[in-house]
Amino acid sequence: MRKPTDTYFLLCVEDGGYPVALEARKVYRAITDADAERHGLVRVVDESGEDYLFPTALFVRIQVPEEAEKVFVDSM
């Protein structure tokens, strides 16, 4: 099981042609993946709870208030 410290949050700024998987202006939980990042990808957790790789350019990293983090991390 991943630790909350292995995760961070991203705002999707463009669906990148993945309209079924990504929604622009939505916050997603991401999982640290050094191998993916070396290839310009980010590992994002979708509504199903599964994680998938997407181009980093589709997101911007954001800080989520501590009170709101629980909502995302509890679904792990």
Image (spheres, rainbow, N blue to C red):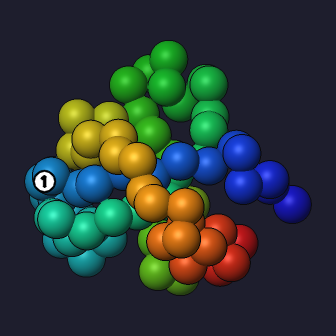
- Does 25 sit left or right of 41 as displayed? left
- Identify which residue is drawn at 12% across, 54% down: 14
Percent x, y for residue 15?
16, 59
In the picture of the structure, the residue carrying the numbered disc 1 is 14
Q: Residues within 10 Å of mark 1 (few under 14, many from 20)?
A: some
Look at 45% across and 60% down and name the residue there: 65
Q: Along the horizontal axis of the image, is 24 left or right of 27? A: left
Residue 18: give x, y in percent of width and height.
22, 63
For image coordinates 40% across by 48% down, the residue present is 63
User: Where's residue 48, x and y in %?
Assistant: 53, 82
Above or below residue 57? Residue 26 is below
x 71%, y 45%: residue: 5
Q: Is residue 64 above or below residue 31?
A: below
> Where's the C terminus, which quadrant?
bottom right
Relative depth, front residue between 68 and 36: 68
Query: Residue 19's spot in the image, x, y percent?
Result: 18, 71
Q: Is residue 60 left or right of residue 16?
A: right
- The answer to whether residue 20 is visible is yes
Amino acid type at mark 1: Glu
For the residue labelled by badge 1, is the local secondary structure a helix, a strand or a loop? loop
Q: Is residue 76 rendered to the left or right of residue 52?
A: right
Q: Quadrant of the N terminus?
A: bottom right
